[in-house]
Amino acid sequence: MTQTHTIDATTHAQLTAIFDAAVERRADDVTVLDLSSVSTTLDFFVIATATAGLQLNAVQENIKQKAMEAGLPRPTVEGPSERWLLMAFGGSIVVHLMTREAREYYDLEGLWSDARVVKFGELAE
């Protein structure tokens, strides 16, 4: 039985800002996972695919700016590498920007397959 987590208005706005910022810089396959029913420490993962180098940096900078405008704290950034960087906005939202190869190799969606995928339509409403 899957629990449904209601996304409050503030978190909804923050996730939408992150999602839109990634799409704005042409990140591919942006996925939001609701981890609240499968993790005691994390609420949401946002996973997006970008090419290495310039695009990865452009997506990161746009997400950082738009997320902070939406009320999130300045993220801590781990990595960054040419394949994957992680942006942690406190414990509630973690963004993974990955190249296609890294995303396929690490398969975070498979690792967290019990998490609910938040459809973009839910965020866009």
Image: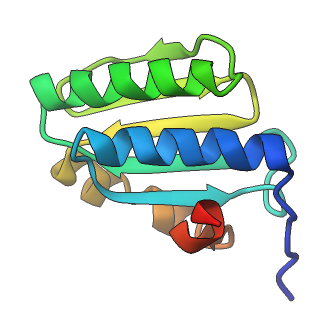
Residue at the image position 60 percent from the left and 10 percent from the top: 74
Q: Is residue 36 left or right of residue 78?
A: right
Residue at the image position 68 percent from the left and 67 percent from the top: 115
Q: Is residue 41 above or below residue 88?
A: below
Q: Is residue 66 above or below residue 101?
A: above
Locate residue 81, reporting x and y percent: 24, 21
Q: Residue furthest bottom?
A: 1
The reply to whether residue 43 is in sight is no
Locate residue 85, reporting x and y percent: 36, 27
Q: Nearer the viewer, residue 83 or 30?
A: 30
Q: Is residue 98 left or right of residue 8?
A: left
Colour convention: rainbow
The reply to whether residue 114 is in sight is yes
Residue at the image position 35 percent from the left and 19 percent from the top: 61
Locate residue 75, reporting x and y percent: 57, 16
Count of picture labels = 0
Residue at the image position 68 percent from the left and 22 percent from the top: 72
Quadrant position of the C terminus in the picture: bottom right
Q: Nearer the viewer, residue 63 or 117?
A: 63
Quadrant position of the N terminus in the picture: bottom right
Q: Is residue 27 left or right of residue 87?
A: left
Q: Is residue 85 left or right of residue 75?
A: left
Q: Nearer the viewer, residue 20 or 100?
A: 20
The answer to which image quadrant residue 83 occupies is top left
Locate residue 69, reporting x and y percent: 60, 20
